[in-house]
């Protein structure tokens, strides 16, 4: 099985990353790793570990300079080796922050590790394989590696530059708060996502789909209701939320009502557009077969509208979560993501705020991913999913 980039060698960007990693690794060996000479004699282990990483980085840089003919058949393994060295170096650098104050050589080592991490992602993105398992593994591995490096840079910069926790806590501090506040986060997640978001999402999208079918039968509704729908969809959630709280109370039904309003009209507009997506030739063919309106709807027009419907579902998956969280700022019981964010900001517990943001981001990403997976299952025939 050939998993290599066919006879491509190194691109100009990859050669530049190699040069940057080599120069930075060499600079980290020459320049002082500590900001003060007193720390050098008291802490030898971090220094030796960082020097070991820099030596490995230099060896890896040299190994990349071998002829491309020897490298073409092992591109995947070279990319994984690069990633292993970069992440190992990043781990050593983060661990050393507990015992040293970063100096010039330390930041040069950070640049070397970051350049190798970028190079790993570049090479992984160029790996071409006919193996479906490897292809899916790379689709997961590349964004995970990219996201991991964002967190690594965030951790090193916040701790290395002593950024106040009130301004921006380190990911490690957020993770500690996440673990210690699991019970609170679960209660907030259940109140906001499982109740307000999911119920409002189902009601809003379902109502939008049904009204779109009614509009499709009436040109009067199409000309009269759609402009009003566009007007209502432009209303700000900060103006709708207090009114819904006054109407439906402080508990989750008022937040679900906000979600219904935010998700109704995107589904309505996309469904109406999708029902008109079938061509005149396809409609004439259905008439030739003597099909009724409902037969034409369920066998031609609704399948043609599925890409538009799933597009609305994906858009609404993020709008619903945003609407529910913002609505909780204007009145809620002492539970919920929006309530927790607003109260913890007032208490200067920024790590708890970021923990809630992390829960919301994970929930929204998983929700979007489920909708995208269903879209691929039901619209596999669409040209966008053909390889």
Image: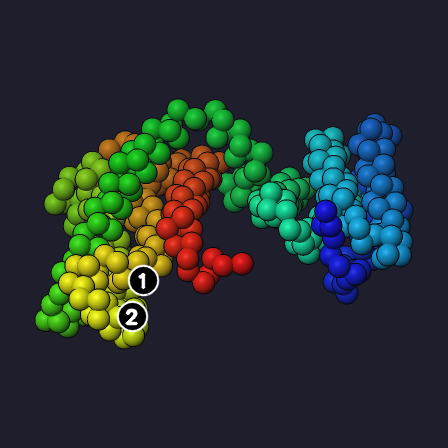
Q: For the residue carrying disc 2, how many other residues have a C-alpha within 10 Å: few (<14), some (14-19), or many (20+)?
A: few
Percent x, y of residue 191: 29, 33
Q: Residue at x 31, y 62 (%)?
A: 304
- Colour scheme in the image? rainbow
**Of marks 2 and 1, which one's residue comes earlier in the chain?**
2
Percent x, y of residue 249: 15, 39
Q: Residue at x 14, y 45 (%)?
A: 246
Q: Looking at the picture, does residue 236 appear above or below residue 190?
A: below
Q: Tell which of 46 and 197 is nearer to you.
A: 197
Residue hosting label 2: 282
Q: Residue at x 21, y 71 (%)?
A: 288
Q: Residue at x 85, y 33 (%)?
A: 48
**Quadrant location of the C terminus?**
bottom right
Percent x, y of residue 280: 27, 75
Confirm or deny contact between disc 2 and disc 1 (CB under 8 A): yes
Image quadrant in which you'd find residue 345 = top left
Residue hosting label 1: 304
Image quadrant in which you'd find residue 347 = top left
Horizontal side of 143 relative to 332 (left or right) equals right
Percent x, y of residue 227: 18, 70
Horizontal side of 27 relative to 313 (left or right) equals right
Q: Secondary structure at mark 1?
A: helix
Q: Nearer the viewer, mark 2 or mark 1?
A: 2
Residue 158 visible in the displayed image: no
Horizontal side of 386 relative to 347 (left or right) equals right
Q: CA distance from mark 2 to mark 1?
A: 11 Å
Q: Looking at the picture, does residue 317 appear above or below residue 87?
A: below
Residue 149 visible in the displayed image: yes
Q: Secondary structure at mark 2?
A: helix
Q: For the residue carrying disc 1, how many other residues have a C-alpha within 10 Å: few (<14), some (14-19), or many (20+)?
A: many
Q: Tell which of 28 and 292 is nearer to you.
A: 292
Q: Tell which of 1 and 26 is nearer to you.
A: 1
């Amino acid at each position: 099985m050939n998993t290599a980039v066919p006879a491509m060698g190194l691109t100009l960007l990859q050669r530049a990353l190699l040069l940057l990693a080599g120069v930075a690794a060499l600079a980290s060996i020459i320049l002082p790793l500590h900001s003060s000479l007193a720390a050098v004699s008291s802490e030898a282990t971090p220094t030796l570990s960082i020097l070991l990483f820099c030596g490995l980085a230099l060896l890896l840089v040299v190994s990349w300079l071998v002829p491309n003919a020897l490298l073409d058949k092992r591109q995947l393994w070279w990319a994984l080796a690069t990633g292993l060295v970069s992440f190992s170096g990043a781990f050593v650098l983060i661990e050393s922050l507990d015992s040293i104050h970063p100096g010039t050589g330390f930041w040069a080592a950070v640049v070397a590790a970051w350049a190798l991490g970028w190079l790993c992602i570049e090479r992984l993105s160029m790996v071409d394989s006919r193996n479906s398992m490897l292809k899916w593994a790379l689709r997961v591995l590349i964004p995970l590696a990219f996201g991991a490096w964002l967190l690594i840079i965030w951790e090193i910069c916040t701790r290395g530059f002593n950024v106040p926790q009130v301004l921006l806590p380190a990911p490690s501090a957020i993770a500690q708060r996440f673990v210690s506040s699991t019970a609170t986060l679960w209660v907030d997640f259940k109140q906001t996502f499982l109740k307000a978001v999911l119920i409002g999402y189902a009601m809003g999208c379902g109502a939008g789909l049904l009204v779109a079918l009614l509009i499709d039968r009436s040109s009067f509704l199409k000309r009269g209701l759609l402009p009003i729908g566009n007007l209502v969809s432009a209303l700000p959630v900060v103006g709708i939320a207090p009114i819904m709280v006054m109407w439906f109370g402080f508990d989750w039904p008022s937040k679900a009502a906000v979600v219904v309003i935010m998700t109704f009209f995107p589904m309505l507009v996309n469904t109406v557009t999708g029902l008109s997506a079938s061509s005149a030739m396809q409609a004439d063919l259905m008439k030739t077969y003597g099909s009724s309106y409902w037969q034409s709807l369920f066998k031609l027009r609704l399948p043609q509208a599925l890409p538009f419907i799933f597009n609305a579902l994906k858009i609404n998956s993020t709008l619903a979560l945003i609407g529910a969280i913002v609505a909780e700022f204007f009145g809620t019981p002492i539970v919920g993501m929006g309530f927790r964010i607003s109260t913890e900001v007032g208490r200067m517990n920024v790590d708890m705020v970021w923990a809630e943001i992390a829960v919301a981001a994970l929930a929204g990403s998983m929700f979007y991913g489920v909708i995208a997976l269903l879209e691929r299952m039901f619209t596999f025939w669409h040209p966008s999913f053909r390889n």
